[in-house]
Structures are given as C-alpha cells and as structure tokens.
C-alpha cells in the first residue's frame, strides 16, 4: 500500500478482502492514469494555440492545469460570449435561489446552488473548482476581459 494511505481494519470474510483489494487497485490505477494524462497535457500544452488562455485561467484561485485545459477545451473561443453572464450560463453556473422568504438570499447567488442547466460542465469538473471564476458586480455583466482577445 502507498505511503500516506489509510490502513484498513482486518475484514471478517475473504470475499470482503477481495472486494477491498479490488477497490484499492482501482484507486491506484486511476491515480496512475491521472498522472500519465497530466504529464501528456503538460507536454502538449506549449504547442497549443490556446495555451495562453489556459495560463490565464490558472491565475484564478482553485483553477489548476487539468481544470483550465478542460474549460478551454469545452468552451473553445471565449470571444463568442458577449459577457460573463453568457459564459456562466453556458457552463451551467446560472443563479439559483431557494428561500422561503423569511431568510435573506445568499450573498452570492451565482454559486448558491447548481441548476444543472447549460452544457453539463459541472458534472465534468468538480463544482468547487468553478468557484475560481471571477465575479463581477452586476452579476457577471462585464467583459470576459483577459480571455476575450485570445484565439
């Protein structure tokens, strides 16, 4: 077992040990695949025309290489969105609110809850990573800024 892994209590039945060992191997294989794919992305990124956009996205809190590449590959040309609101709607990060009327609305309705509308982006990239997107006053009505001029 890898260093830093949780140690499991002995299991009661040999079938449980088989299943546990299978899960452990599945996690190890997934980690190895992730490492391999991340290295391949790192090697190919410098030759990609969208590399500057990937770099710009990584400047945001919570956005690392794999998330940035995934967003750029999914969105393509950011210039097709007139403003951040359109981009957020495309990504499925539209405002949603659940309140009974007695409590004040959440301070940030953009990320209060997922509506699961849009292109399913949130199902592909963990939701907490999407919190790195810039938030503009007026609920995203501004330009996509740095990303708007990059092809």
Image (spheres, grey):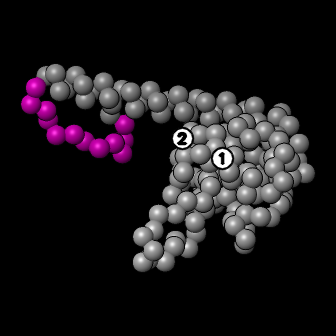
* Dominant secondary structure (helix, strand or loop) of the stretch shown in magenta: loop
Q: Quadrant of residue 38?
A: top right
- Magenta range is 2-13
Question: Which residue occupies the foreground of this view, 7 or 136?
Answer: 136
Q: How dense is the environment of label 1, judged by Cα within 10 Å: few (below 14), some, or many (20 and up)?
A: many
Quadrant (top left, top right, bottom left, bottom right) of the C terminus:
top right
Residue 57 pos. (x, y %):
73, 52
Q: Is residue 110 left or right of residue 12?
A: right
According to the picture, the residue beneath numbered tag 1 turns out to be 91
The magenta stretch spans residue 9: yes
Disc 1 secondary structure class: loop
- Residue at (69, 33) in percent of width and height: 41
* Residue 89 in view in this figure: yes
* Residue 66 in view in this figure: no
- Residue at (54, 33) in percent of width and height: 34
The magenta stretch spans residue 10: yes
Q: How dense is the environment of label 2, judged by Cα within 10 Å: few (below 14), some, or many (20 and up)?
A: few
Instruction: State the CA–CA distance, disc 1 to disc 2.
Output: 10 Å
Extreme left residue here? Answer: 12
According to the picture, the residue beneath numbered tag 2 turns out to be 123
Is residue 146 placed above or below 106 in the rendered structure?
above
Q: Which mark is residue 129?
A: none
Q: Is residue 91 left or right of residue 11?
A: right
Quadrant (top left, top right, bottom left, bottom right) of the N terminus:
top left
- Residue at (9, 31) in percent of width and height: 12
Whichever of labels 1 and 2 marks the residue nearer the N terminus, that label is 1
Residue 126 pos. (x, y %):
53, 47
Q: How many marks?
A: 2
Is residue 123 placed above or below 27 in the rendered structure?
below
- Residue at (22, 22) in percent of width and height: 18
Q: Is residue 50 left or right of residue 58?
A: right
């Amino acid at each position: 077992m890898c260093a830093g892994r949780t140690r499991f209590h002995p299991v009661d039945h040999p079938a449980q040990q088989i299943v546990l060992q299978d899960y452990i191997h599945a996690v190890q294989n997934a980690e190895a695949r992730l490492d391999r794919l991340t290295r391949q992305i790192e090697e190919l990124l410098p030759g990609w025309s969208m590399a500057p956009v990937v770099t710009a996205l990584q400047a945001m809190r919570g956005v690392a290489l794999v998330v940035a590449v995934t967003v750029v590959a999914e969105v393509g040309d950011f210039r097709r969105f007139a403003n951040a609101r359109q981009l957020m709607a495309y990504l499925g990060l539209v405002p949603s609110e659940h309140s009974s009327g007695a409590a004040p609305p959440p301070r940030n309705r953009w990320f209060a809850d997922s509506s699961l509308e849009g292109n399913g982006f949130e199902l592909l990239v963990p939701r907490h990573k999407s919190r790195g997107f810039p938030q503009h006053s007026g609920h995203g009505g501004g330009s996509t800024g740095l990303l708007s001029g990059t092809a």
